[in-house]
Image (tube, rainbow, N blue to C red):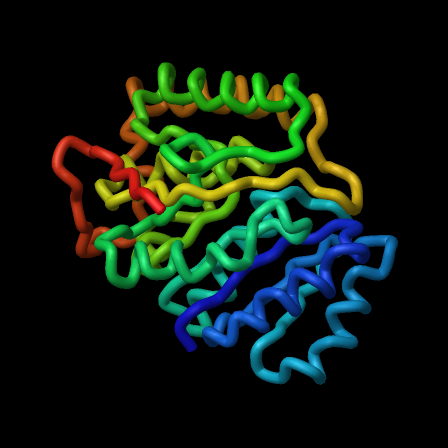
Amino acid sequence: MEKLVVIPTYNEKENISAILHAIFDLQQEFHVIVIDDGSPDDTAQVVKDLQSKFPGQLFIDERKGKQGLGTAYIHGFKWAITKGYQFIFEMDADFSHNPNDLPRLYHACKNGGADVAIGSRYVKTGGVVNWPWDRVVLSKGASLYTRLITWMPVKDPTAGFVCYKKDVLETINLDEIVFVGYAFQIEMKFAAWKLHFKLKEVPIIFRDRTLGVSKMNKGIVKEGILGVLKLRWHSWFTNYRKRVKNIENAELNPLPENKVVAESK
């Protein structure tokens, strides 16, 4: 068992079967765990019905109530670590992230020297399709704001299509990751960067969902704005690195000057 994709779901019945088939059709030994937060549209049942078709490859963990994106991913990360997976992926269920890019993220970590491979919309040859102009402005503005406040040199810090080496998730104290919305994505990258892991941005084309309903809301935006300020505060005035480090003797793989590498297609 080497590669696990963690997919959080809430009311993704319209997408989940197709995205799972697309991943398994790659035939590259990706396993998937779906973390479902009690979807009232029976998303979980769709996954269960598919488990007999993909035995030993497809797993599901059902939680009661909508507990947030960040807690779902952390739940999946911990499960992956206990099962011994070496490369753990974050991915949306709605085809915003192209399953065909999974091998590219994997090879960036497996063979390309990255500890964290980020599917990036905002590096050269990356991009966004079918987003309204105000959503593009909001996303790019959030990325610029995050870079200015945290000094973290990642062009797409809110990206949710990511591959982590197991060592990264074992080294980060996942219980100290406090944000649950899109700020979670920022904090995970910030923690890995602060712990001197090597981050690499891999260009992707992000496509807006065509089925289902976006989970974006004002609360998520507010958490992102305030969360970035909190990260900067903790970095300046507390020992953030010590707080988020889980394993005292972990073998870190530092990148000189904390630089982030961008990769072309």
Left or right side of 62 for 199: left
Q: Residue, x 81% and y 68% (percent of image)? A: 45
Closest to the observer: 22 or 148?
Answer: 22
Closest to the observer: 127 or 7?
Answer: 127
Left or right side of 9 for 185: left
Asked whether the viewer can see residue 98, the reply is yes
Closest to the observer: 127 or 28?
Answer: 127
Q: Indicate the position of residue 29 as horizontal and vertical percent values.
A: 47, 76
Q: Indicate the position of residue 187 as horizontal and vertical percent values.
A: 43, 35
Q: Indicate the position of residue 185 as horizontal and vertical percent values.
A: 49, 38
Q: Residue, x 58% and y 82% (percent of image)? A: 56
Q: Residue, x 46% and y 40% (percent of image)? A: 177
Q: Residue, x 79% and y 60% (percent of image)? A: 43
Closest to the observer: 146 or 228?
Answer: 146
Q: Quadrant of the N terminus?
A: bottom left
Left or right side of 97 for 189: left
Quadrant of residue 251 within the rendered picture: bottom left
Quadrant of residue 238 within the rendered picture: top left
Left or right side of 224 for 135: right
Looking at the image, is 51 positioned above or below residue 142?
below
Looking at the image, is 6 positioned above or below residue 176?
below
Asked whether the viewer can see residue 38, the reply is no
Q: Indicate the position of residue 89 as horizontal and vertical percent values.
A: 47, 57
